[in-house]
Image (cartoon, helix red, strand yellow):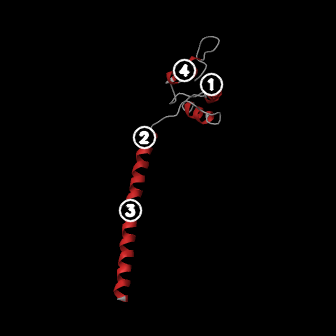
Amino acid sequence: MGRSSCFFFFFLILVFFAFFSALVTASERMVDGELSINLVVYKHKHKHSGFSAAECPGACQYRCSKTAYKKPCMFFCQKCCFKCRCVPPGTYAHKEVCPCYNNWKTQRGGPKCP
């Protein structure tokens, strides 16, 4: 009786570990599936408003990356970002996304923000 009960407990523990490992693997797949869905949803989202002062230089560096006039572009872009807390997406145009950025004009009526 001692040997059969020992075998039974060993078998029961083995079944428990097999069940537990299958449960953990299934939950990991579900977490990975949810994670990949979240990454796909947020991958294409461009953050263009609600910037902190620390985020403005990076956003402006991308905004001014394709211009030949980097220093003035960076200067005015950062000035606009610090005031408006917004930088339009992309390297050109799309100013309608940021009304403050779009509507801030020079004394001569031209656009202040690049």
Q: Earlier in the sequence, mark 1 or mark 2?
A: 2
The residue identified by callout 3 is 23
Name the one closer to the observer, 54 or 18: 18
Can you tell which quarter of the image residue 104 is in?
top right
Q: Earlier in the sequence, mark 2 or mark 4?
A: 2
Instruction: Give the residue at x 50% y 21%.
Output: 96
| Cα distance between the residues tagged 1 and 2 | 29 Å
Q: Earlier in the sequence, mark 4 or mark 3?
A: 3
Observer-side mark, 3 or 1, equals 3
Q: Is residue 36 above or below residue 107?
A: below
* Disc sitting over residue 41 in the figure: 2
Q: Earlier in the sequence, mark 2 or mark 3?
A: 3
Observer-side mark, 1 or 2, equals 2
Q: Earlier in the sequence, mark 4 or mark 1?
A: 1
Q: Amino acid at mark 2?
A: Val
Observer-side mark, 2 or 3, equals 3
* Image coords of residue 23 (percent x, y): 38, 62
* Image coords of residue 80 (percent x, y): 62, 25
* Disc sitting over residue 80 in the figure: 1
Name the one closer to the observer, 93 or 31: 31
